[in-house]
Amino acid sequence: MASFVMFASLFLLMASDKDDRLPVNTIRLPPGFKIDVYAGNVPDARSMALSPNGTLYVGTRTGGKVYAILDNDKDNMADEVLVIASGLNMPNGVAYMNGSLYVAEISRILRYDDIDDRIQIPPDPVIVNDSFPSDEWHGWKFIRFGPDGMLYVPVGAPCNVCLREDERYATIMRMMPDGTGLEIYAKGVRNTVGFDWHPDTEELWFTDNGRDWLGDDLPPDELNRATEPGMHFGFPYCHGGYISDPDYGKGRNCSEFAPPAINLGPHVAALGMRFYTGSMFPEEYRGQIFIAEHGSWNRKDPIGYRITLVKIVNSTPVSYGVFADGWLKGREAWGRPVDVLVMPDGSMLVSDDKAGAIYRISYDGE
């Protein structure tokens, strides 16, 4: 079957190619931070997952491939980029659990067992669950295992703004690792492509992309907090916690729904997010939220194309601002951040699907 085509191939990472194509010296960061190219030949790099042995797995949206990235000499720069799966249907999401790599296509979740030990000749995948909708619009998925051991799988709205009878749309679902027990965890979520759990409370936090065509500055993207199962976050009736939808908001009140934890920039396409749980960055960053903003398309003056920081106190956001930018030059972007991942040493990786690269942000205090 074409979707199960499996092979491993090596891309040689040439330093000169990375330097010429990826001008990371133009990225602005707070004092003491620096950014380097971790892997410079990862076309369409999207969601990331790390195995205990340090192998970085990366999904793609348009390339149909899944990568394994190896830093064999542990010098914080990739030595090998292997294609471990190809011919898949938007395999955006990747998650690792108990020796297996889980990969999310549009309508199904696959599992590659003992992947770290079989990386040169990857195994055939096991179909974990193939019951998800097949719509391509917001059909690509970000997946992660929660602290409850369940795999969380979003199902985006198959539209800009709409209401479907199928209750799975515009939700975050979850299931057991073997694909059983599939259930809706959160409703009214237009399209989340990034979430994480608070390191202390274990509450789910997630980004959500706002609808288009309400103008340059409306509605905002959202950072949401789910304190319990079954919460409804407003879509398609209400946006940003205060904007009634012109088509679907009639007869509904925004007070009916869970408000955002904080509103983000309009149309910034907030995707991957992580709580910073490392110890490399200064104390003020620990326990705070980093967000990859892919960048706007439905806006006259583009914004996003950056990494932002949401600071929280007692699980309450108190500020939202830019941490790293420079991928956008005027009206043109040379890169688009997609996902962030905190490494065991406390550095942070950033994927970029436009430049086809993975970056490493570290702090040395100088």
Image (cartoon, rainbow, N blue to C red):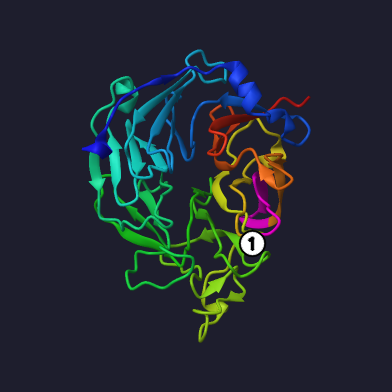
Q: Is residue 162 above or below residue 205?
A: below
The C terminus: image quadrant: top right
Q: Residue at x 68, y 29 (%)?
A: 23
Q: Residue at x 48, y 58 (%)?
A: 191
Q: In the image, 233: left or right of 17?
A: left
Which residue, as the protein is rendered here, is positioned at the far top? 73
Residue 356 is inside the magenta segment? no
When asked about the image quadrant of residue 346, the answer is top right
> Looking at the picture, how far across and down is residue 364, in whole percent?
72, 25
Q: Residue at x 64, y 38 (%)?
A: 334
Residue 261 visible? The answer is no
When asked about the image quadrant of residue 24, the answer is top right
> Looking at the picture, how far across and down is residue 136, in whole percent?
38, 55
Q: Nearer the viewer, residue 19 or 28?
A: 19
Q: In the image, 306: left or right of 57?
A: right
Q: Nearer the viewer, residue 63 or 276?
A: 63
Q: Nearer the viewer, residue 321 or 8?
A: 8
* Amino acid at circle 1: Asn
Residue 301 is inside the magenta segment? yes
Q: Give, as a single range, the part of the protein colored magenta.
A: 299-317
Q: Which residue is mark 1?
A: 263
Residue 14 visible? The answer is yes
